[in-house]
Image (cartoon, grey):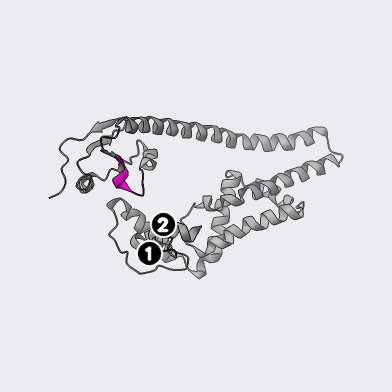
Amino acid sequence: MIPFWNWKTTGDWRTTPYALYAKRYFPYERPGFGLDPTPPERRLPAGLTPFDAEFRSIHRRFTAATLPSALLRRSADAAGQVWGGRLFLALFFALGLAALSAESALALACAFGILVVYLVYALSPGAAPYYAEGYPAFALVTALGLRAAMSWLGTRAVPRIAAFLLPAFVLALLAPAGLQAVVTRARKQLDSNAYAQFRAQVDALGGRGAVVFVPCTAVRPASCEWVRNVPDLSREAVWVARDLGEHDAALIAVAGGRRQFRVGDDGRLRPILGLAPPL
């Protein structure tokens, strides 16, 4: 399927869309060590200049000599994602290693394999979601360790209060993680509601043609994800683009007379007056 997808998207069955995108804008974004000095085929949009500078620096510093520290840092990032920063759970993870079945050992090996495979690529600090497929295996081993600790207490002549305190202690320490999950879910729901209101306004514009500029600001950071990157703009009545200030006029020049709107900090669409295409 991938060669067919490539052919229908880029015109060449050997070239993926991402490979073409990287060649045009970020030729250094590929597996390997160090920074590829090949210049991009196209000039970067103004909004991507900081991104380019940051990731050039990351690739420049990523060498074979930095692999041990990269593995350590990425493992710590993954552990922070799985355990929510509660590193005491590493003790139960260690206990769980002694309780692995053949199936859970395979799952854990695959999870570590993801970390190792990504060592051929320079990733930004905190890019732990790349390893998310392995998180269930790490969580499983941690749970096995907790069960082993509980079983050990059950076979020892210890006061009942001690057998009760261990799970109570663990649950108390994990309670903030549950609260954080509730807060995060509520924030996501607010973002989802804001996007739904935005889409309703865009849909209400109908087929008369419009360009909607979405500013990416600290007031509404989630709006950065509202931009629609469609394959064929000529077939889209409404374009949703990132607001780049003075550079917006360049898009208006090819918009075919579409009306212009900008999203305010309150999420409402407002007409833009006096924005003319460059001469």
Q: Secondary structure at mark 1?
A: loop
Task: Kindly identify which residue carries mark 2.
Answer: 8
Give the residue type at disc 1: Pro
Give the x, y percent position of residue 233. Answer: 31, 47
The crowding category of the residue bearing disc 2, from other C-alpha atoms within 10 Å (few below 14, some 14 to 19, many at least 20), is: few
Q: Nearer the viewer, mark 1 or mark 2?
A: 2
How many angstroms separate mark 1 from mark 2 (CA)? 22 Å
Give the x, y percent position of residue 62. Answer: 46, 65
Task: Kindly identify which residue carries mark 1.
Answer: 27
Q: Is residue 267 visible?
A: no
232 within the magenta span: yes
Give the x, y percent position of residue 102. Answer: 76, 55
Q: Secondary structure at mark 2?
A: helix
x 51%, y 70%: residue: 65
Give the residue type at disc 2: Lys
Q: Quadrant of residue 198?
A: top left
169 left or right of 61?
A: right
**Is 14 in front, or is 147?**
14
Tell me if residue 132 comes above or below residue 199 in the rendering: below
Give the x, y percent position of residue 154. Answer: 83, 39
User: Going by the picture, which residue comes out furthest to the left?
Assistant: 279
Tell me if residue 132 comes above or below residue 61 in the rendering: above
The crowding category of the residue bearing disc 1, from other C-alpha atoms within 10 Å (few below 14, some 14 to 19, many at least 20), is: some
54 left or right of 125?
A: left
Q: Magenta residues, as a range? A: 230-239
